[in-house]
Image (spheres, rainbow, N blue to C red):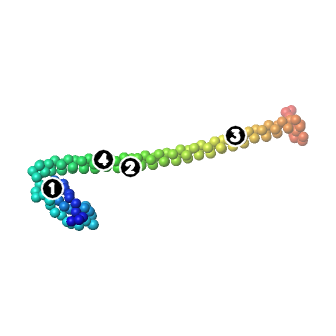
Amino acid sequence: MDRCVERTSLSIHNFGRRFYGCQQWSPDSVQACNFFKWLDNNTCPRGRATAPLVHERFTRYKAEAVAARNERDEAYVREAETRELLRIAKRKAEKSKLALRIAEDKVYKYRLALFLFWTVLGVYFVFSTVLGGHGHTQLRLP
């Protein structure tokens, strides 16, 4: 009796009746004792009239809670999917930036090679005309 507490029944048949029960009791508890003793003899008329209304309201609230929980879970799933899509998009953007940088580096190298080619060719022609071609055969039309 020292571990007992006063409780109120919420079942339809005994709604509102008070009883002593183990303070550790819950439907899946293995630590609770099975002590149980009614304090009231019967459910009062008002309790019997109120029980179905309370039970109906409780059932409705329970259904609303389940619906809200399902909606929340769906929102979590959508959020996770969106985060995954965002991660993929960021990764693609990084790959695109890297590919663009590689392409720009290639363009720079090709431009530099082209510039050096034309510079060497120009220097060759300048020196060949200035120095007179030293031993080079020149094509002459008859």
Q: Amino acid at mark 1?
A: Arg
Q: Tell me what residue is drawn at x 90 percent, y 40 percent.
A: 134
Q: Is residue 25 visible to us here?
A: no
- Disc 4: which residue: 68
Q: Tell me what residue is drawn at x 81 percent, y 38 percent.
A: 123
Q: Which mark is residue 77?
A: 2
Q: CA distance from mark 2 to mark 4?
A: 14 Å
Q: Answer whether labels 3 and 4 touch (C-beta < 8 Å).
A: no
Figure check: 48 above or below 21: above
Q: Tell me what residue is drawn at x 19 percent, y 61 percent.
A: 20
Q: Residues within 10 Å of mark 4 (few under 14, many from 20)?
A: few
Q: Answer whether labels 1 and 4 touch (C-beta < 8 Å).
A: no
Q: Secondary structure at mark 4?
A: helix
- Disc 3: which residue: 111
Most distant residue in the top direction: 142
Mark 1 or mark 2, which is nearer to you?
1
Q: Nearer the viewer, residue 111 or 89?
A: 89
Q: Secondary structure at mark 3?
A: helix
- Disc 1: which residue: 17
| First in sequence: mark 2 vs mark 4 | 4
Where is residue 127 shown, x and y percent of the image?
85, 38
